[in-house]
Image: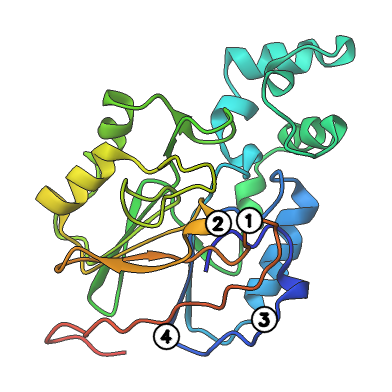
């Protein structure tokens, strides 16, 4: 699943049981502590033995750009005057005060206690190698946004070549990335990295709600798992897939 945006209580389907549950980011609207706690409670109620989560562009409080460093300190210093980094991004329909409160909360990533949170990190489950990373090409200047080109590629270069299941928030260009405007929002460098070097069995992502579904280049299965549609209605069911356990490993 991906892009549930605080709407798990409005899901119109059951979550199928499985060994591993994956959420590819945007589980909140703005990354506030209460939103994260609600998501953590919900994911804790799922029966899956393993649960893996990455952040998306809506998890503002997970991105150090908004929570620490000179820019963030200036943001908090100027909060009473209405200035600061958080005021330089579009509000996407969320009250500016809520955005400010979200990034002023500390250590919000520690509120994820019922799942393994991955941020540019690998994880091995039953011999199957996963890797999770939240970055995306610039998209409204929200969390984990980077300029297209080298800065994105630098993040993708950290993905181990032996990865079986890659979890990103952004799609690669050409797979589940077509916006309603006709623009493809996916990352060119990510597609090149995935196809030419990493070659995972599965690539799971979200971010572009209208891109929900499964595609393939004949070798890799690409899954846009966005739960919400373009109108932020959580109608898209979870996508289930099987990965063979390597010899010598068991559940």
Residue at far front of view: 182
What's the residue at 70%, 28% (across, down)? 90
The image's mark for residue 209 is 2
Query: How dense is the environment of label 4, judged by Cα within 10 Å: few (below 14), some, or many (20 and up)?
Result: few
Say which residue label 4 marks.
19
Place of residue 5 in the rendered image (x, y in percent of width and height, measured from the top left): 68, 57
Instruction: Note whether 250 is above or below 149 in the view shown.
Output: below
What's the residue at 11%, 86% (across, down)? 247
The image's mark for residue 93 is none
Figure quadrant of residue 126: bottom left
Place of residue 41 in the rendered image (x, y in percent of width and height, measured from the top left): 72, 70
Say which residue label 1 marks.
230
Q: Earlier in the sequence, mark 2 or mark 1?
A: 2
Q: Are marks 2 and 1 in contact (CB under 8 Å)?
A: yes
Q: Earlier in the sequence, mark 3 or mark 2?
A: 3
Determine the secondary structure under disc 1.
loop
Query: How dense is the environment of label 1, judged by Cα within 10 Å: few (below 14), some, or many (20 and up)?
Result: some
Label 3, label 1: how many angstroms apart (C-alpha)?
27 Å
Query: How dense is the environment of label 3, judged by Cα within 10 Å: few (below 14), some, or many (20 and up)?
Result: few
Label 4, label 3: how many angstroms apart (C-alpha)?
14 Å
Determine the secondary structure under disc 2.
helix
Figure quadrant of residue 249: bottom left
Looking at the image, residue 31 sits to the left or right of residue 156; the answer is right
Q: Are marks 3 and 2 in contact (CB under 8 Å)?
A: no
Frontmost of labels 3 and 1 is 1
What's the residue at 15%, 68% (across, down)? 218
Determine the secondary structure under disc 4.
loop
Q: Earlier in the sequence, mark 3 or mark 1?
A: 3
Q: Earlier in the sequence, mark 4 or mark 3?
A: 4
Q: Earlier in the sequence, mark 4 or mark 1?
A: 4
């Amino acid at each position: 699943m991906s892009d549930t945006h605080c709407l798990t209580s409005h899901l119109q389907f059951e979550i199928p049981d499985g060994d591993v549950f994956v959420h590819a980011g945007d589980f909140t609207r703005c990354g506030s502590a209460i939103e994260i706690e609600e998501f953590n409670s919900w994911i804790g109620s799922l029966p899956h033995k393993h649960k893996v989560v990455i952040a998306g562009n809506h998890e503002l409080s997970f991105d150090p750009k908004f929570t620490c460093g000179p820019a963030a300190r200036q943001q908090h210093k100027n909060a009473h005057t209405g200035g600061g980094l958080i005021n330089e991004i579009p509000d996407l329909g969320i009250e500016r005060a809520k955005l400010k409160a979200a990034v002023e909360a500390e250590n919000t990533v520690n509120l994820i206690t019922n799942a393994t949170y991955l941020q540019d990190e690998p994880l091995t489950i039953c011999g199957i190698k996963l890797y999770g990373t939240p970055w995306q090409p610039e998209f409204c200047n929200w969390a984990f946004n980077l300029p297209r080109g080298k800065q994105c590629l630098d993040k993708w270069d950290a993905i181990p070549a032996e990865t079986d299941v890659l979890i990103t928030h952004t799609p690669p260009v050409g797979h589940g990335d077509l916006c309603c405007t006709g623009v493809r929002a996916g990352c060119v460098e990510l597609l090149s990295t995935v196809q030419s070097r990493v070659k995972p069995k599965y690539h799971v992502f979200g971010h572009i709600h209208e891109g929900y579904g499964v595609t393939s280049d004949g070798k890799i299965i690409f899954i846009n798992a966005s739960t919400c549609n373009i109108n932020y209605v959580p109608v898209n069911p979870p996508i289930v897939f099987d990965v063979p356990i390597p010899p010598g490993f068991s559940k």
